Image (cartoon, helix red, strand yellow):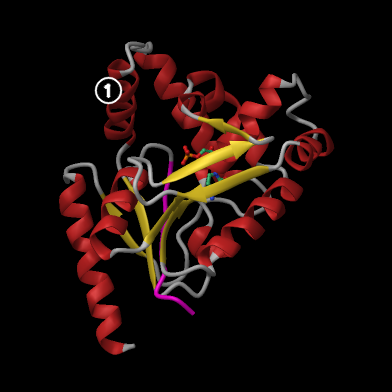
Amino acid sequence: MHAHVAIDGPVAGGKTTVARLLARELGYLYLDTGAMYRAVAVMGLRYGVELDSERAVLEVVREHAVHVELDTHGDRGYRVFAGGLELGEELFAREVAAVVSVVAAHPAVRDELTQRQREIAALGPVVMAGRDIGTIVLPDAPVKIFLTASVEARVQRRFEEYSRQGNPPDLAHLRAQIEERDRIDRSRAVAPLRVAEGAVVIDSSDLTPEAVVQMIHARVRAVAAVR
Ligand code: DC
């Protein structure tokens, strides 16, 4: 078992930024599993499939194989392909954010992606971010983190992110969308978002990403010392 770091938490809790910085610092692989679910949502929207239908979405996953390549040189740390084509910024579009929780609630879709995530973890130690990494994907990971923040902090972060893309959203609408995604992620029947056994809970509302990275890094060192 590699010395994986599993980072789970709600929408816009800071997982991606922290996981990427931490992976760089540790020299580990890095994978944002949310991007894989987003890729499925992009393809579902592109082909106009019924997103509520597990069978239809699974067909999309199988026909347009979602595939992730690790890319230690690029900024993002990985590249996502679907049906042989690379997906870029469209993964983070608002239309995708609006439907991705629905797509991610289908058990058969989760099975497919979980399998691929474990294949990547078999390549070497990885910092993997998502919703079910510490509970389902890598339950034996020696370091598990549940990274959260107040709704206000999370809304503010997402607002700034979209504004930087030149597309500032309506704040009330953004808040409603984040709360709705949280609700779906927490209440779905399979692999719901919850704190994994043995996870350290970190509230990042008033912390910089660097401070969070240092807290997790300290945990990695402490666990390595007793392994
Ligand atoms: O972290 P994110 O916002 O990019 O995730 C996008 C969606 O994918 C989110 O609504 C929940 C889902 N997801 C999941 O169900 N399991 C994961 N391991 C990662 C993401």
Vertical side of 11 occupied by 134: above or below: below
Q: Is residue 2 magenta?
A: yes
Please identify the quadrant where the C terminus is shown. bottom left
Q: Residues within 10 Å of mark 1 (few under 14, many from 20)?
A: some
Residue 29 lies in the magenta-colored region: no
- The answer to which image quadrant residue 58 occupies is top right
Q: Which of the pair 199/220 is nearer the observer?
A: 220
Of 46 and 146, nearer the camera is 46
**Residue at point 49% right, 80% down?**
1
- Determine the residue positioned at 57% across, 42% down: 36
Residue farthest along the bottom direction in this orientation:
226
The residue beneath circle 1 is: 160
In percent of the image, x 31 and y 21: which residue is there? 159
Q: Does residue 128 appear to the left or right of 82 in the view shown?
A: left
In which quarter of the view is residue 51 placed?
top right
Image-based side of 171 in relation to 82, left or right: left
Q: Is residue 1 left or right of residue 213?
A: right
Task: Give the overall secondary structure of the magenta segment.
Answer: loop
In the rendering, at what x and y percent does residue 85 appear? Answer: 61, 31
Could you tell me residue 135's position as x and y percent?
Answer: 53, 64
Q: Amino acid at mark 1?
A: Glu
Q: Where does residue 30 sit, x and y in percent of width and height?
A: 40, 55
Q: Is residue 178 above or below residue 191?
A: above
Q: Judging from the image, what secondary structure is the residue with disc 1 in? A: helix
- What residue lies at 42% left-to-right and 63% top-to-bottom? 126
Q: Which residues are magenta?
A: 1-10
Q: Is residue 153 in view from this perspective?
A: yes
Q: Nearer the viewer, residue 6 or 116?
A: 116
The answer to whether residue 184 is visible is no
Asked if 138 appears above or below 113 in the picture, the reply is below
193 to the left or right of 204: right
